[in-house]
Image: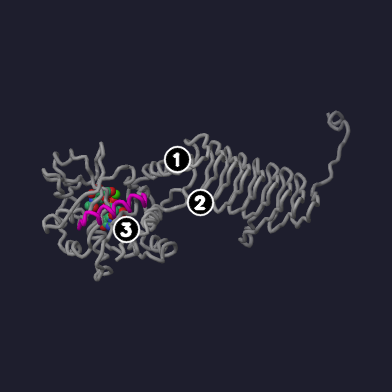
Amino acid sequence: MGIKSIILAAGKGTRMKSEKSKVLHHIFDKTLLGYVLDAVNDTHMVEQSYVIVGHQAEAVTEFVNKNYADNSKTILQTPQLGTGHAVSMACSELENFDGEVIILCGDTPLLTSDTISDFIEYHKDNKADITVMSAIFDNPFNYGRIVRNIDKTLKKIVEEKDATIEEKQIQEVNAGVYCVNWNKVKKSFTELKSNNAQGEYYLTDIISWGVKHDLHVQAYTLKDNTEILGINSKIQLAEAAKILNKRNLIKLMKNGVTIVDPDTTWISADTEIGTDTIIYPSVYINGKNTIGSNCTIGPMAHIRGNVEIGNGVRIGNFVEVKNSKIKDNTNVSHLSYIGDSELGSHVNIGAGTITANYNPVTKVKNKTIIGDYANTGSNSVLVAPIELEEGAFVAAGAVATKNIKSWALALSRAPMKIFENWVKQAK
Ligand code: UD1
Ligand code: CA
């Protein structure tokens, strides 16, 4: 039988100081909850996910239904009486389920699918009833601590607020991820007590419950403890974004992409880049894109998603590209905006060329098509919808509003007049 997941996302996230649900905040174009759901789905081990929602339930439900409806649904928890109470909301859905359930939080975007897979394998290989993910921290403040017996077997988890001075010294913490044999553990949810410092039903109490009921309870210790960094504030959001970005850059560099300054370069995980492409400083690449080999991008370029770039293409400084295809050996070297466009190969886009794709009156976005070997002069505006056929030439300063045939020249400028000695005479 497949595995099911429960993802806790009902909490308020007070420290974000935001009107928006914590799990709907973004790193690149993906929400925190999106990272968790993608990591779960990418294991190909989980057949169904239940997202527990509460604060901003409507917005979170809309997000899940829009993007993950095929194998995920939300369950409302109201009021929010703690993490154990949150999981118990899924009990009726899972009444007849006889398999493993993995429980995660919606605010841990750095957890990878490889780690989740490894965690599930470890649980299965050891025929455990409950496996909790743990991590070792120099400064374990605020996390639940893993309390072990002298023989190292698990005893319980104690929250920071409930811990004794000795327990606070423990550096092994609860990462908040669990894999449980549902049939054996489901009864615990009717027996959890809220007699603790926070007056909540703690999910962490399933550990001592399991020990008491002679279940096989174990911990899986993370190799890279940045993976469980939970986002509680906008400071942590920025920290997590940096870590995630660094992972993406390292992967690209290992695959042969040159990144001149990783400290100022941002590239989303969904961007593929070919070998020997050079990314200059201060480039921001968001969303899903493919960029070929031997290209140069930047410095200071912005690629906004759904962009396909061929080989040997130059995207220069202060160029923005979105939702466009650009074929091999084309140059967009300076100060241009390319949106909703298709550019052939060997095209030269002059400095300051703008594809005027958006009609704010009709709110329609229109397409620009540019054939192979076409040229645009500096400061030209291509008012979409428009097509420049192969080799067409738009002269500098043009406002092009009509299609331009192959190898034709399009001029749209007032003829220049010169008044000899005008300046001297005017003085
Ligand atoms: C929890 C663990 C702690 C662990 C830490 C790891 C408990 C009691 N404590 O603490 O041992 O070290 O995670 O990050 O579980 N949520 C709900 N409904 C609720 C309460 C919370 O859905 O009623 C959700 C939150 O939205 C969040 C997750 O559960 O996604 C964790 O809740 P949070 O309050 O952040 O728990 P921590 O105090 O971090
Ligand atoms: Ca938390």
Check the image and name the residue furthest to the right: 420
Magenta-highlighted residues: 112-129
Q: Which residue is mark 1?
A: 250
Q: Please, what secondary structure does the residue beneath circle 3 have?
A: strand
Q: Is residue 403 left or right of residue 269?
A: right
Q: Is mark 3 within 8 Å of ligand 1?
A: no
Q: Residues within 10 Å of mark 1 (few under 14, many from 20)?
A: some
Q: Compute the Cα span from label 3 to label 1.
A: 29 Å
Q: Please, what secondary structure does the residue beneath circle 1 have?
A: helix
Image coordinates for residue 229, horizontal then vertical, percent? 33, 45
For badge 1, the amino acid type reads: Ile
Image coordinates for residue 271, horizontal then vertical, percent? 51, 48
Decide: is 355 above or below 296.
Answer: below
Decide: is 205 above or below 264.
Answer: below
Q: Please, what secondary structure does the residue beneath circle 2 have?
A: loop
Q: What type of secondary structure mainly makes up the magenta span?
A: helix
How many callouts does the rendering have? Answer: 3
Q: Is residue 5 left or right of residue 365?
A: left
Q: Is mark 1 within 8 Å of ligand 1?
A: no
Q: Residues within 10 Å of mark 2 (few under 14, many from 20)?
A: some
Residue 421 numbered tag: none
For badge 2, the amino acid type reads: Gly
Mark before the other along the chain sequence, 3 or 1: 3
Q: Which residue is mark 2?
A: 287
User: Which of 71/76 is in front?
Assistant: 71
Check the image and name the residue furthest to the front: 125
For badge 3, the amino acid type reads: Ile
Q: Which residue is mark 3?
A: 7
